[in-house]
Image: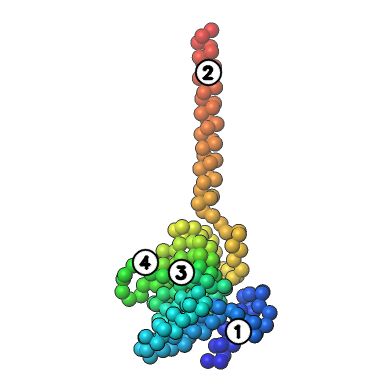
Amino acid sequence: MFKVLKEDIEVVFDQDPAARSRLEVILTYAGLHAIWSHRLAHALFKRKLYFIARIISQISRFFTGIEIHPGAKIGRRLFIDHGMGVVIGETCEIGDNVTIYQGVTLGGTGKEKGKRHPTVKDNALIATGAKVLGSITIGENSKIGGGSVVLKDVPPNSTVVGVPGRVVIQDGVKIKKDLNHSDLPDPISDRFKTLEAEIALLQGELRGLKEERSKMNANSNI
């Protein structure tokens, strides 16, 4: 248990350059508090002490702004950065070395029974405000861009952006967890640029036809 708690603290220093001391991390990092509260709630949940587990999770939500259902399975070295508004559903499964930013939802899509929340594999990164919904899998080393809505499985070593989420990078090479939120590929913007180029081409051809027609009319008048 103490080894896991130590890892939870160390990952903060690995991921957050603002972390200065262990005391500061232990006392002020809401993401760390939410993870520790969840570990206790999950242990009680597995022992079928559902009511007490839910009470602990709701108290944690009140103080941290992070809601993790006690039934969710969380691996080692999870880092929740800032964390306000993060929601992690009951049947969610999160692997090791996963990073989650504020406003992320790992939720369901309806009232279906059984496995209804996402599975997030090792080394994944889910950026600010992303929504990952349904019983889908986010592959190892993958990144979900800020504000994306992901409704389908994401292959390993991929980057997903957009609404709905689209895979924009997949090269089979492990992607470093240093996602630049301001420099993400935008497939919708790229498509608009393509359409603008096609419209400009058509407008040029239309002007050419008008000029030819004007010349023909001028010659006929002569």
Task: Report the residue at 31% width, 74% height from top.
Answer: 113
Query: Which residue is tagged 1?
Result: 26
Q: CA distance from mark 2 to mark 4?
A: 60 Å
* CA separation in Å, label 3 and label 4: 11 Å
Helix, strand or loop for disc 2? helix
Disc 3 crowd rating (10 Å Cα; few below 14, some 14-19, many 20+) is many
* Label 3 close to label 1 by CB (< 8 Å): no
| Amino acid identity at mark 2 | Ser
What residue is pinned by disc 3?
105
What separation in Å lies between label 4 and label 1 (alpha carbons)? 35 Å
Q: Is residue 24 visible?
A: yes
Instruction: Read off the residue under disc 2.
Output: 214
Q: Nearer the viewer, mark 2 or mark 4?
A: 4
For marks 1 and 2, the one nearer the N-term is 1
Q: CA distance from mark 2 to mark 3?
A: 61 Å
Amino acid at dot 3: Thr
